[in-house]
Amino acid sequence: MQDKEQRVTEHIAELRARVIRIGILLLLLLPIVFYFSPVLIQRFWEEVIKEEMFAYSPLEWILLRLVFSLILSLIILYPYAMFELYMFAKPGLYETERRILKFAIIPSYLLFLAGSYISFEFLVPFLYSLSYGNAYYSVEKTALNALKISFALGIFLQIPFAIFLLDKFRIVSYQTMKSVRLPIYIFIFAIILNSSEDLGGLTQIITLISFFIMYELGLFMLRLSKR
């Protein structure tokens, strides 16, 4: 029992050390991105919103720079964070599981970037073209809402991949994921409804449909792989 407790303590210590390394890199990267954030936000605004930008208070501008810098820093650090988590889990994995996870890290990151690109290039400009330039052209509300939409789509594109891995590693079975669809959809709907800015409800509808399509696609692909 003592040996088992010691092993658990060692695992927790190793996980803490890896999380601390990720946190240190984030703290080092965040000020750099924050310094360049005005230029990046301005370029984002010109490419995506294409309207005059308004900041109604200094605090609004500072808050936007902080959130923008944090999200961009997390996106940059994503591959390293996944590598650290993989190295933590590696000793307890079979060789086939190690190969699967090793090849999953880069595609997962690329899917996230692809979802964000599609959102910034097509979805967000389309949504804001329907807003008629009202109060949404407050820089904080507009940019943060665009980041939420893009982040959500980047995550949603990884759902089929995640469903496959959950079943492959016997964490959650196909039948379980299929049977809990309705509660999951209700839960996601509640989150989206309370986290997205309102554009006549169109933002929430498109985000929810994106999640629904990716979840059903993941189940469909997993069912085909089992035949």
Image (cartoon, rainbow, N blue to C red):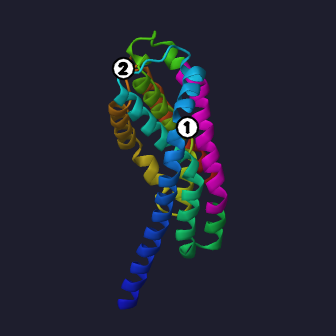
Please give the name of the residue rendered at 35% of the width and 90% of the height, measured from the top-left corner: 2
**Which of the pair 14/198 is nearer the observer?**
14
Please check the rendered image and state whether residue 108 is part of the magenta-colored stretch, yes or no.
Answer: yes
Please check the rendered image and state whether residue 83 is part of the magenta-colored stretch, yes or no.
Answer: no
Say what amino acid the circle numbered 1 marks: Phe
| Identity of the residue furthest to the top in this view | 132
Q: Where is residue 67, by image quadrant?
A: top left
Please give the name of the residue rendered at 61% of the width and 48% of the height, measured from the top-left corner: 109
Residue 27 in the image, given as x and y percentages of width and height: 47, 53
4 relative to 201, above or below: below
| Identity of the residue furthest to the bottom in this view | 2
- First reached walking from the N terminus: tag 1 or tag 2: 1
Disc number for residue 56: 2
Q: Is residue 176 left or right of residue 88?
A: left
Q: Which residue is mark 1?
A: 36
Q: Is residue 61 left or right of residue 21?
A: left
Q: Where is residue 6, by image quadrant?
A: bottom left
Highlighted range, magenta: 101-125
For label 2, the crowd category at 10 Å Cα-Cα, with few meaning under 14, some 14 to 19 and many 20 or more, is few
Say what amino acid the circle numbered 2 marks: Tyr
53 relative to 7, above or below: above
83 relative to 107, above or below: below
User: Circle 2 — which element?
Assistant: loop
Marks 1 and 2 sit apart, C-alpha to C-alpha, by 21 Å
For label 1, the crowd category at 10 Å Cα-Cα, with few meaning under 14, some 14 to 19 and many 20 or more, is few
Q: Is residue 2 visible?
A: yes
Residue 105 in the image, given as x and y percentages of width and height: 62, 55
Which secondary structure is most common in the magenta stretch? Answer: helix
